[in-house]
Image (cartoon, rainbow, N blue to C red):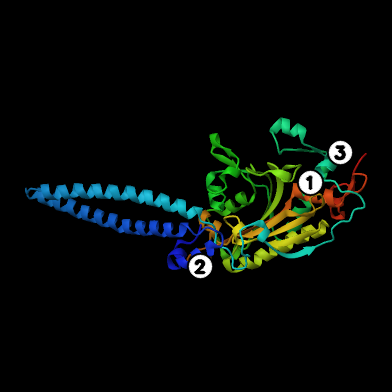
Amino acid sequence: MLDLKLIRSDPERVKAALARRGAADGVDELLALDARRRELLPEIENAQAERKSLSKQIGEAKQRGEDAAGPMAEVQELKERIESGKAELERVGAELERVATALPNLPDPDAPEGMTEEDAVVLREVGEKPRFDFEPRDHLELGTELGLIEMEAAAKLSGSRFSYLMGDLVLLELALVRFALELVRGEGHEPVVPPVLVREEALYGTGFLPGDRDQIYEIPKDELFLVGTSEVSLAGLHADQILDAGDLPLRYAGYSPCFRREAGAGGRDTRGIFRVHQFDKVEMFSFVEPSESAAEHERLLVIEERILTELEIPYRVVNVAAGDLGAPAAKKYDCEAWIPSQDRYRELTSCSNTTDYQARRLACRYRPSNDDSPQMVHTLNGTAVAVGRTMIALIENRQERDGSFSVPKTLHSLGAPERIGPR
């Protein structure tokens, strides 16, 4: 949620920033609702004070035996005005909340111009793309042939875009998770296995609601939702808290299954395990002082690149365009892995600086010193390992003519086979 004081003080700057995201229309409506609310509050308070004064006068008049019909009529009129004002105030407040929560974060000045994925700016390419002396196959063909990925049985069980991962691929997943958790813990991120069922407030607090509701699995009977990322659960860890400045930064790494409906997704991305409804992920999350968030964002990117480098995955880093950012993000980097079967780079991990957008919704603050009033923290998130897509990159980039693929050395000591292939 944006700072209403900032919008009041400099609406044109806010509108110009949001116009880069195609989302400036709500600002004037928000200001009109805010102005009406600020008019109503003193009107109601003045009417209540007047009613109290008249009630006192009525009591005194009756004690003297005087007629109080006039003041009593005025009190009744004031009562109706107060009730009407309160009802309007409630309606205005609800509408103000609706408009405010629909506005996305202000984009960072360094976020590139543009509205689509193609408008992202490539910052660098790292690693050598593989050269094959045979026609490379995609992960599903290889995984099915090796008995490692079973889609048909999963479709019968759960519907499309679910899978069984089998045998050595399971050991590879567990090794990837352990590798990522150990690496990021060494960078100061405390491992967490968080809840994956959360209340609606958690999704509003992180900015995934109201806009992404059609992408989220909902369990109406229990009023719970399945998270699409452990970012939601980790952000809620310090909701409604005032943190001590001395405790910041607070850094976590959540490991959890994630669930996304992927409504509207189609085409080639639905083949295999690239875009599925259930997947596992290790997610980094940071709570920092505002002055440190830009540096923390770069720090998360360094960790993501270190992971990809140690896994020997060719990748590139892009700075995502302002109009293609998710609602909470002010700035976002994507690390895209080279996928040979698609002959292009595809998103593998990302990291976002959400500044105070989530913290304001979650009421997560910190006190700079004992004498200072609480201020909003800044929150950031970054993917350490998206397991399914990382395995796709490993399978396809490291495949050999016989249908086998090698596994990076960094995973061998963690239980992954050196090579996965026909037996």
Residue 60 placement, left or right of 340: left
Residue 366 seen anywhere in this rendered image of the structure: no
Q: Earlier in the sequence, mark 1 or mark 3?
A: 3
Q: Amino acid at mark 2?
A: Asn
Q: Which is in the foreground here, disc 3 or disc 2? A: 3
For label 3, the residue is 145
Spatial CA span between label 2 and label 1: 46 Å
Residue ID at (57%, 50%): 208
Q: Earlier in the sequence, mark 3 or mark 2?
A: 3
Query: Relative to the observer, which residue lies in front, 65 or 82?
Result: 82
Q: Amino acid at mark 3?
A: Glu
Q: Which is in the foreground here, disc 1 or disc 3? A: 3
Task: Tell me the quarter of the picture where residue 272 sits.
Answer: top right
Q: Classify 21 as above or below 399.
A: below
Q: Amino acid at mark 1?
A: Glu
x then y, percent, for residue 225: 58, 41
Secondary element at image label 2: loop
For label 1, the residue is 173
Residue ID at (76%, 32%): 153
For label 2, the residue is 370
Circle 3 residues within 10 Å: few <14, some 14–19, many ≥20: some
Circle 1 residues within 10 Å: few <14, some 14–19, many ≥20: many
Q: Earlier in the sequence, mark 2 or mark 1?
A: 1
x then y, percent, for residue 28: 43, 60
Residues under numbered marks 3 and 2 in contact, where contact means CB atoms less than 8 Å apart: no
x then y, percent, for residue 2: 50, 60
